Amino acid sequence: MTWWHAVVIFIAGMWAGTINTVVGSGTLVTFPVLVALGYPPVTATTSNAVGLAPGTISGAYGYRHELVGYWPQVVRFAIASFFGAIGGTVLLLTLPKDAFEKIVPVLVGLAVVLVIVQPKVSKWVQKRREANGREHHAGPLLFGLLFVIGIYGGYFTAAQGVMMMAVMGMLLSEPLQRLNGVKNVLSAVVNIVAGTIYAFVAPVSWPVIGLLALGSTIGGQLGAKIGRKLPPTVLRGVIVVIGLAAVVQLVLK
């Protein structure tokens, strides 16, 4: 690894940590960067899962005040994410490598679409909650959806946070800032589970992991403190541009 590769990966990790905490989809920054630097898609995915885990923990810690008194519920959600993440890692490790390389452009494209429509989903959720005036509590549907999202997150982490915010926003009545805190905790659970498994049994790059871990940890704190003041449109625009570039590169590869 050259010195400038290391700098680029560190900066990408820091940007991803910030984006993951504020919006989600930080993987759409780091994954294309790693692929562009020559890392195989599977190695880029597994190294991302391990390297970005500290950033999700950092972001969750930054949102700890929004979760005061809500931790018993968060733990219940985390159980669904935990088992879903295990399922996702099993899929990545058992399906043929060629299958992953064929499906990953589709997954990146799906993640980009989710990022684009996320503002409209948030507005719809907010209007729905204001209109019906009912309290929505966690039920089997929510736990099932969090389990499925955990599978997706364990297999390919991009945009899992956007998915979590969408389903929780529709099925819970909690304030959006609290839901964002829950999202950060659940993303941390998925990344830790997947990252731990991949660290032992999957191809990973430890230099990449170290740089991503350091950068994303710093980014997680920036996202929790400063990132909420940044224009979400700017963050989202960067994600979309990088994601589309990744799709083009992967299709033409």
Image (spheres, helix red, strand yellow):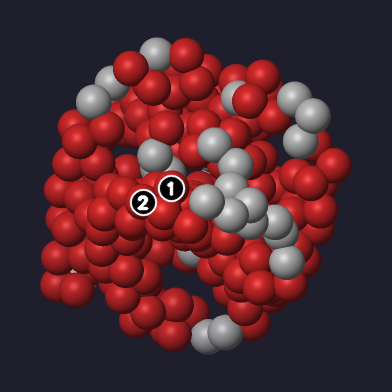
Pointer 2: what residue?
127
Residue depicted at 21% across the width and 65% down the height: 247
- The quarter of the image holding the N terminus is top left
Q: Nearer the viewer, residue 106 or 118?
A: 118
Which type of secondary structure does the marked residue at label 1 adopt? helix
Residue 185, placed above or below residue 103: above
Q: Nearer the viewer, residue 238 or 202?
A: 238
Q: Residue 105 appears at what percent x and percent y?
A: 29, 71
Q: Residue 189 appears at what percent x and percent y?
A: 70, 47
Answer left or right for 117 relative to 3.
left
Q: Residue 23 appears at what percent x and percent y?
A: 39, 39
Answer left or right for 123 relative to 58.
left
Question: For mark 2, does the 10 Å Cα neighbourhood hold few (<14), some (14 to 19), or many (20 or more) residues?
Answer: few
Residue 5, placed above or below residue 98: above
Amino acid under disc 1: Glu
Residue depicted at 32% across the width and 43% down the height: 29
Residue 224, placed above or below residue 145: above
Pointer 1: what residue?
130
Q: Looking at the image, which residue sits at the far right? A: 72
**The quadrant where residue 178 appears:** top right
Task: Report if the CB atoms under discs 2 and 1 are less than 8 Å apart.
Answer: yes
Amino acid under disc 2: Lys
**The quadrant where residue 111 appears:** bottom left
